[in-house]
Amino acid sequence: MSLYTKSLKISKKHRNSVLGMRSFACGGCSKTYKSYPALYLHIKRKHNGIKPPNTVTMKSLDSPNEAPVQTGRPHKPSYNIDNVSTVETELEVVQNSLFHLLGDKMHVIEDFEPKVKMEDVMNKIREAAQGKDDKYITTLLAKSEEYYNDFKARFPQGLEIKLDTEPELIGSEDDLKCLAWYVIWLGKFYLKPKFVPDLFILVSKIWKVLDEFKLNIRDLDNKIIWKKVLIESDFLKENNEFLKNEPTQISFLIQIVCQMIDKIFLQFSDYPE
């Protein structure tokens, strides 16, 4: 667990002990909060930013001598608001950035259209690794095969079940398994099959950087890591189908892929309760 995460937990406990009761109340739905920032974001999300009548924005409901009414934009809180964590919000932003960048490289499943099978994704991964004499590619392939076989054993009736719940089961202790899941998940639900090999090779470069510098996926939200992956991924400038005609976007692709993996697994590991 990082020192940064510990400090978040300590500050949250301190904040709750100081504020005590839920003294900030929404007049529209009777929800109460322990801070003005929490109430502010609730109103922004649930009431389109319009403060309902009878909303209480004073620090205490009991004492008129407490802090005056607060207005305007508060400091951004780092904890759950309406059951939406900061990490989830950041993940949504990063995911949307990736989907926007990929554009027509994404596939959209229409009604009655056959879904992409995990076996098809695995075949594309095997295709990417074929003939490659690179230990990071072969180890990522081996972990992908292991994860795929384990998934088949757990769900023998079929492989069309969603993979979205898997990160919570995987956790963030097995970095290579996390990376294998990401390739399979993105390939099955979002990415056109012909781009899966390039995604697989890119993720193998991420694994190489993490392994060589003794880091883990919780270190991926870091500019130094992105630069190291970019150096390792020099081949992307010419050979990667992702951005074959958009070489200036390669560094951005690496950045948001790294951030997305980091945010997905951060939800189930170090995020303060």
Image: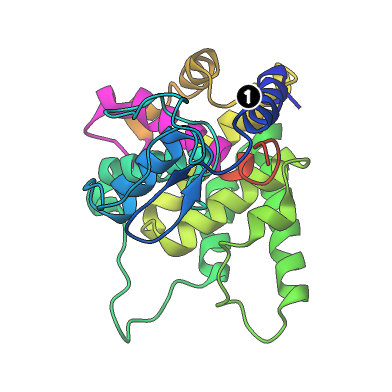
Please determine whether, in this image, residue 270 is positioned above or below residue 141. Answer: above
Residue shown at the point (34%, 28%) measured from the top left: 70
Amino acid type, mark 1: Asp
Please determine whether, in this image, residue 6 is positioned above or below residue 196. Answer: above
Residue shown at the point (28%, 27%) measured from the top left: 249
Residue shown at the point (41%, 34%) measured from the top left: 58
Asked where in the image residue 250 lies, by quadrant, the reply is top left
Name the residue beneath numbered marker 1.
219
Nearer to me, 250 or 98: 98
Residue 10 x, y percent position in the rendering: 71, 24
Q: Principal SS element in the magenta part?
A: helix
Q: Which residues are magenta?
A: 240-263
Residue 130 x, y percent position in the rendering: 59, 48
Residue 237 x, y percent position in the rendering: 34, 25
Nearer to me, 39 or 24: 24
Q: Is residue 190 visible?
A: yes
